[in-house]
Image (cartoon, rainbow, N blue to C red):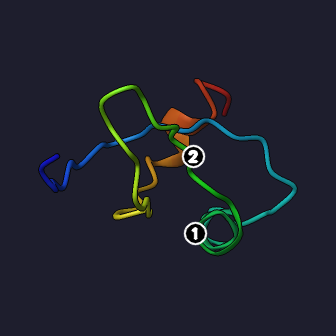
Amino acid sequence: MKYQTIYIMVRVAVHADYIHIAEAVHELETQSKLSLTDTANINILETEILLSRVRNTKNINHGKH
């Protein structure tokens, strides 16, 4: 079996009890887990969040002003 690094970008929609989005992002980065399971031909060795990006609030609120 060959060792390889695969980069996967994930979009996550959340509802959070924070006023500032930066607080929610920080909590997700430090406390939540991204989980992938092994398959018949692939053993998952490690996962991590590589990049956090926040869209502007106009897009997040889906048109609410």
Looking at the image, residue 11 sits to the left or right of residue 51; the answer is right
Q: Residue furthest right?
A: 17
- The residue lying at 59 percent from left, 25 percent from top is 62
Residue 47: which quarter of the image? Answer: bottom left
Secondary element under disc 1, as helix, strand or loop, is helix
Of the two numbered discs 1 and 2 on the same chain, state the one appearing first in sequence.
1
Real-space CA distance between mark 1 and mark 2, rounded to the nearest whole angstrom: 13 Å
- The residue lying at 67 percent from left, 28 percent from top is 64
Q: Is residue 43 above or below residue 49?
A: above
Q: Nearer the viewer, residue 46 or 27?
A: 46
Residue 60: % across, % down? 57, 37
**What is the three-letter code of the residue carrying label 2?**
Ser
Q: How many numbered discs sit on the rendered protein?
A: 2
Residue 31: % across, % down? 71, 70
Residue 1: % across, % down? 17, 46
- Label 1 neighbourhood size at 10 Å, few (<14), some (14-19), many (20+)? some
Q: Nearer the viewer, residue 23 or 63?
A: 23
Q: Nearer the viewer, residue 55 or 32?
A: 32
Label drawn at residue 38? none
- The residue lying at 56 percent from left, 51 percent from top is 34
- Label 2 neighbourhood size at 10 Å, few (<14), some (14-19), many (20+)? few
Marks 1,2: beta carbons within 8 A: no
Residue placed under numbered mark 2 in the picture: 35
**What is the three-letter code of the residue carrying label 1?**
Glu
Q: Is residue 39 above or below residue 56?
A: above
Secondary element under disc 2, as helix, strand or loop, is loop
Q: Quadrant of the C terminus?
A: top right
Residue placed under numbered mark 1 in the picture: 29
Q: Nearer the viewer, residue 31 or 21?
A: 31
Residue 25: % across, % down? 60, 64
Q: Is residue 39 above or below residue 60?
A: above
Looking at the image, residue 34 sits to the left or right of residue 49; the answer is right
